[in-house]
Image: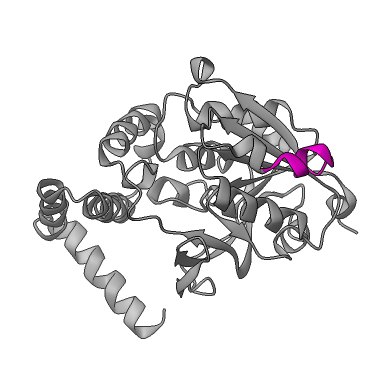
Amino acid sequence: MNKYVKGLVSIIITTHNRKEMLAKAIESVLNQTYKNLECIVVDDASTDGTREYITEYINNNRICYYYIPKNESKGGNYARNVGLENASGDVIAFLDDDDEWLSTKIEKQLLKLSEENQFVYCGRIFGTGIEFYKLYEEDIKNCKYKEGDLSKEVLVHVIGVTSTIMVKHQLIDKVGNFDEDLKAWQEYDLCIRLLQNTKAAIVRENLVLYRMQIEDKNRNTNNIDKWIESTKLIEKKYKELFKHLGVMDCFRRKLYKYIDGYNRAKNAKNVFLKRKYWFLIVLNPGVLMIAVIKKLCSNSGL
């Protein structure tokens, strides 16, 4: 039997002024079919009455609650690291405060976790609104969602977002916590380091309800300036690793980056940057070729 099936799993939720969605995130943790959990909520200087809103959870010892005062606040990655420092479990899973999990998420991921595969991810169902209006699901059974040795693949594109991944605590201790200098792509940075040191497994099911808060200007996903700054830091940080990518993988990497930039610029309503990333795709022959191949493969179901 997988030794992790009965072990303690630490769930880390960081939050800032999202009390209604936070309550839904917490309930999705407490409703997991796997019960040996500790739910750690790190409140990054909320001013909307979050603590009062979840007092019942705190008083009944259903969650461990840590509050970061405004004068000590250093951003989301610092808050996640506070959670990690207070986590007791052998296994760590992260949940963003505006997302939710299906009830079997932890149970199914634990069955995939092993000494060889210390990193497990799953797919997402995309939606909007507090009541979660479903938009579409990831085609998680598509062969583009890979497992095994992803040490090079992770250099090309993001593999798993914060709410979808589960990882052994000792592996995070080995590679280091979240980089507090990054204001975006924080899970990408962590996954690059993790996947240089372990193989990955995947649960080919969409077990995360992922909210797309396009109208929220404060959401990191919609902050194009923070994203540009973070991509530059990551380029510099992993310069030597990127050098070992082949030509096609370099084009794939550029395409992923440009598409992500285009979507973020679109959400931020930045017309100039939206056009810039569009032209970077269509005016780069190699990138355009990869985009066409990707589209053809998508249409054929590959």
Residue 237 lies, in percent from the top left, at 39, 27
Task: Compare residues 3 and 286 and report the one nearer the observer.
Answer: 3
Rendered-image quadrant of the C terminus: bottom left
Colour scheme used in the picture?
one colour
Relative to 180, is 117 on the left or the right?
A: right
Pick whichever, 228 or 218, lies toward us: 218
The residue located at (59%, 32%) in the rendering is 43
Q: Pick out the residue farthest to the bottom.
A: 300
Q: Is residue 180 above or below residue 223?
A: above
Q: Using residue 107 as the reference point, say whether residue 235 is left or right of it.
A: left
Above or below for 13 versus 120: above
Question: What's drawn in magenta, residue-wise?
Answer: 54-62
Horizontal side of 99 relative to 30 (left or right) equals left
Residue drawn at (18%, 58%), measured in percent from left and top? 286
Looking at this view, name the residue that lies furthest to the top: 71
Residue placed most toward the observer, 11 or 159: 11
Whether residue 197 appears in this view of the structure is no
Picture quarter with the N terminus: bottom right
Residue 20, x across and y down, in percent: 56, 51
Number of labelled discs? 0
Residue 128 sits in quarter? bottom left
Q: Position of residue 167 (x, y in %)?
A: 67, 45
- Residue 275 in view (yes/no): yes
Q: Which one is nearer the viewer's eye here, 92 or 219?
A: 219
Queried whether the magenta region covers residue 153, the answer comes back as no
Question: Residue 22: where, in percent of width, then height?
Answer: 59, 48
Q: Residue at x 63, y 33 (%)?
A: 42
